[in-house]
Amino acid sequence: MKTVHGACPHDCPDTCAWLVTVDDDGKAVEFRGDPEHPFTNGSLCSKLKRYPQRVYSEDRVLYPMRRVGPKGIGAFERISWDEALKEISQRLKQTLTDSGPLAAMPYNFAGTLGMLQRYAGEQFFARLGATEVLGDLCGATAYDALSSVIGPMDSMQVEDIEHSRFIILWGTNTATTNVHLWSGPIARARKAGAIVVSIDPIKTNTAAHSDWHIQVKPGTDAALALAMMHVIVRDGLHDEEFINKHCLGFESLKERILDYPPEKAEKITGVSATEIEKLAKAYAMGTPSVIRTVVGMERYSNGHTAVRAVSCLPALTGSYQQRGGGLSSFMLTMFFDVLDYSVMLPQKEHLPRKRSIHLVELGKVLTDPKMAPPIEWMMVYNSNPVVSAANQNLIIKGLKRENLFTVVHEQFVTDTALYADILLPATTQFEHLELMPSWGTGYIALNKPAIEPLGEALPNTEVFRRLSKAMGFDEEYLHLGDEERIRRMLNTRHEYLNGITYETLEEDGWARLNLKDFQPLAEGKFNTPSGKCELYSQAYADAGQDPIPAYEPLDDFEYGIGHATPLHLITAKCAHFLNSEYVNLRHKGTEKHEPKVDINPADAKTRNIIDGDLVKLINCFGEVHVRANVSNMTKEGVAYLPFNWWPETMANGQSASALTPDGVSRRDIGSNAFDAQVEIQKIG
Ligand SMILES: Nc1nc2c(c(=O)[nH]1)N[C@H]1C(S)=C(S)[C@@H](COP(=O)(O)OP(=O)(O)OC[C@H]3O[C@@H](n4cnc5c(=O)[nH]c(N)nc54)[C@H](O)[C@@H]3O)O[C@H]1N2
Ligand SMILES: Nc1nc2c(c(=O)[nH]1)N[C@H]1C(S)=C(S)[C@@H](COP(=O)(O)OP(=O)(O)OC[C@H]3O[C@@H](n4cnc5c(=O)[nH]c(N)nc54)[C@H](O)[C@@H]3O)O[C@H]1N2
Ligand code: SF4
Ligand SMILES: [Mo]
């Protein structure tokens, strides 16, 4: 028996540390959260308790496979790694000869956030000169908007939320998506008397368990934040000293907020003027007050306006300077300095790349006849875009192209893997070495392989080493071993890494960075070009965008719906799954959960729908058949369907992403998937 340290690989702010006990036959027999880890506190979320079931699932892809039937039906035959690599590299060489390297592209997203497996292919594809995939489905719009106000920096540590006395969870479902923040610092703050407010169009688990739920209309948070600022300044509740000393552009903002009296914001947001007044005052006086926001507001064409406006609130109250006050979001920027990312990222001579496409536009990229050259060779790893990217039907149309050769490296036969020409087996976190930074805490962890890879599964890093060899790429950096890469990444001599080495991580499993008394804004040192909190953003002005926060309506788009009052469709996350993972491993507790759409009683009544009816959601992108749950969970005019479910679990084989637009947000970074509108009709 031995016990091995590891850490959760998922795109989740908690980055829990875990312990795996392995018996003499090399089988993982016990799995638990590391009780020593202060943030995880020995508990894993309910999803991850199923990780061993995931690892040992009989549905794992364990051998390389070649497609034998039509694309999409999932008929594969087992082949050897040599055969797979030969076929993949021959097809790639053929593509290079026929159409050049731009006809090849990777598609990689957030299946693992480990430094090795996440970035494993970056150098290979840059060396190849393949089409680069830019843009993002998670966090980049929010990060960009927040950075335009405070600069690229981590503004506070989540642990300090414990000291907050007024906590606004703004567009984040903390109790479900960030469970240790909810059960740790927030629970402790509440015990000491803190008020928790949830601002969300949906009565989520978090909203239901908060002290106050503000049910805002989707995509209108900027107006709510501006009206709160209106009240705060009108009533003299702002912190003039902080503003004079540390903010840039207050006079312009002051003029702007005159345009947002609560009565006007009520019409935009659906939140009554009285409630806005009450919230603004309680927020300004509830010292120290904190706003916690992650990615819920960003997935709109106007997502940046919301995050920018919200980020100005703690500047007006001066709470950025207080312990337990300010704005809590990503804890990520520090890792860009703490770790040497260049070990994983493209060599300078391969930059800039000659063509880039936008991640959120995968369907368009694969089907647009104007793409020159068209994509003929694609490798998908760490992602299941058929579920997680928008416009599912167009993506599938692209994946079905006979002249597209698709490689998918996966742990399971996902809806994306069904379209693979060659399907490669990927290891899980139990089977490979990994270095885990965290985007939500100040911890770093070393995940040691607990068991031997099952079947012939290989880590992403090894696949790209083998692929480099097959392509005749013999540069040293493409062939570095995993441990060597981690050692080099840790070799920055950054003060936060003092006393933390490969060896100490090996011994302890994880370490808290040497953040000491981490309160970077205590002295008001913002990381912006001016060094101040930029209520006026020159960077936005230079990009031709409004330099002062404003509410901008969502893009006007024709969703092809006849109904005069279509419903706004939100497709966020749910408790049982981690993005599209675990959907295929529904266990006893969740089997009784079936996908359903939540609609408000008023909307149900006008459509003759009663609770439990089978309904269809339709717009120009697709159609989803699902049961209706009629309740006050959503506001009138809003429908809610979790995005995690796989198409195969849905009555008509299309899931939430079949209804989401594949446009790029106005800052040209993220997705506008939450702009979606649908009509809902009873079936039969
Ligand atoms: N409508 C809507 N769309 C959304 C969101 C939403 O809320 N609503 N959320 C967005 C967000 S925040 C995110 S992060 C994205 C997530 O989008 P994706 O990154 O596509 O995440 P998953 O759908 O979980 O797919 C990850 C896949 O990677 C595989 N995988 C895991 N580990 C490894 C590994 O080590 N190697 C290889 N080769 N494969 C591995 C898993 O088996 C899984 O199938 O979705 C986004 N899309
Ligand atoms: N159980 C579970 N946990 C997860 C995940 C999961 O799939 N399942 N995914 C992980 C990932 S990849 C990430 S990035 C994090 C994300 O963590 P969160 O940011 O908390 O997650 P989301 O569900 O994307 O969005 C949060 C909330 O935003 C709300 N929202 C939508 N539109 C608006 C709006 O216009 N205004 C406001 N105020 N709110 C709005 C949604 O209703 C939703 O409740 O969670 C991680 N944790
Ligand atoms: S998904 Fe999040 S909460 Fe669950 S174990 Fe992983 S890091 Fe922890
Ligand atoms: Mo995410």
Image: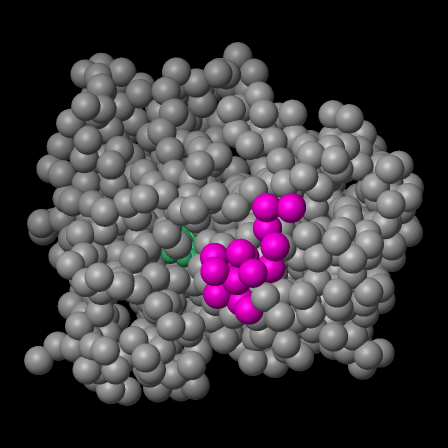
How far from the left and from the top, in percent, is residue 345?
Answer: 56, 29
Q: How many marks?
A: 0
On screen, residue 510 versus residue 480, left or right, reads: right
- Where the C terminus falls, by quadrant? bottom left
- Where the N terminus falls, by quadrant? bottom right
Coloring basis for residues: one colour
Q: Quadrant of residue 579?
A: bottom left
How far from the left and from the top, in percent, is residue 604?
Answer: 27, 79
Examine the rendering and report whether any part of residue 594 can be seen.
Answer: no
Vertically, is 183 above or below 440? Answer: below
Q: At 42% from the left edge and 74% from the top edge, which residue is drawn?
A: 634
Q: At 59% from the left edge and 50% from the top edge, which residue is drawn?
A: 260
Q: Nearer the viewer, residue 564 or 681?
A: 564
How far from the left and from the top, in percent, is residue 27?
Answer: 52, 70
Vertically, is 319 above or below 644? Answer: above
- The magenta span reads 257-272
On screen, residue 633 versus residue 5, left or right, reads: left
Q: Nearer the viewer, residue 571 or 259?
A: 259
Vertically, is 44 above or below 569? Answer: below
Q: Nearer the viewer, residue 511 or 675?
A: 675
How far from the left and from the top, in percent, is residue 619?
Answer: 20, 57
On screen, residue 507 versus residue 67, left or right, reads: right
Examine the rendering and report whether any part of residue 258 can be seen.
Answer: yes
Q: At 12% from the left edge and 77% from the top edge, which residue is drawn?
A: 683
Q: At 23% from the left edge and 47% from the top edge, which residue is drawn?
A: 558
Instruction: Decide whether residue 483 is among the magenta residues.
Output: no
Q: Quadrant of residue 489?
A: top right
